[in-house]
Image: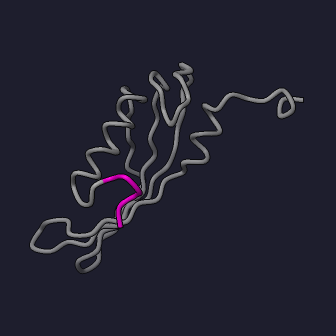
Amino acid sequence: MPAEGLPDGPEGQKAISRVVFAAFPDVHVTLEYAIAEGDLVAERHTARATHKGEFMGIPATGKKVSWTENHFYRLENGRIVELWSEWSYQALITQIAPQSKAATR
């Protein structure tokens, strides 16, 4: 099921990519692990970038950031037919969100 407000399938993935690349145009991804068994593929990677554009309402900070992602794919005839993704969204937001005065004491 796609995230609320996003189209299903490849168009939803493209929409997410546009948001990420607008905020982090210099993103560099390092593949950490990839495992395949039968029709399933799992991969984990680390992304590093600079926060150069608005992301989730947070204006550009210029900070260097990193996050991890895990993706699981199911293939049919060499094509991805299902995708499950999880990424360290909270870790990313913590790196770019403005700090409250109470949190810095």
**Going by the image, does 17 lie left or right of 67?**
left
Q: Residue at x 28, y 52 (%)?
A: 12
Q: Is residue 6 above or below residue 96?
A: below
16 over 54 or under it: above or below: below
Residue 27: percent from left, percent from top: 39, 32
Q: Going 44% across and 23% down the picture, which residue do you hit?
A: 53
Judge by depth and name the residue closer to the eye, 83 or 5.
5
Query: What stretch of residues is rendered in magenta?
Result: 1-6
* SS assignment for the magenta stretch, majority: loop
Outermost residue, right side: 105
Q: Report x, y in % for residue 78.
A: 12, 68
Residue 5: say if magenta: yes
**Relative to residue 22, is residue 72 depicted above or below?**
below
Residue reaching furthest to the left: 77
Residue depicted at x 61% and y 45%: 91
Residue 104 position, x and y percent, is: 84, 29
Asked whether, in this view, residue 63 is left or right of residue 82, the answer is right
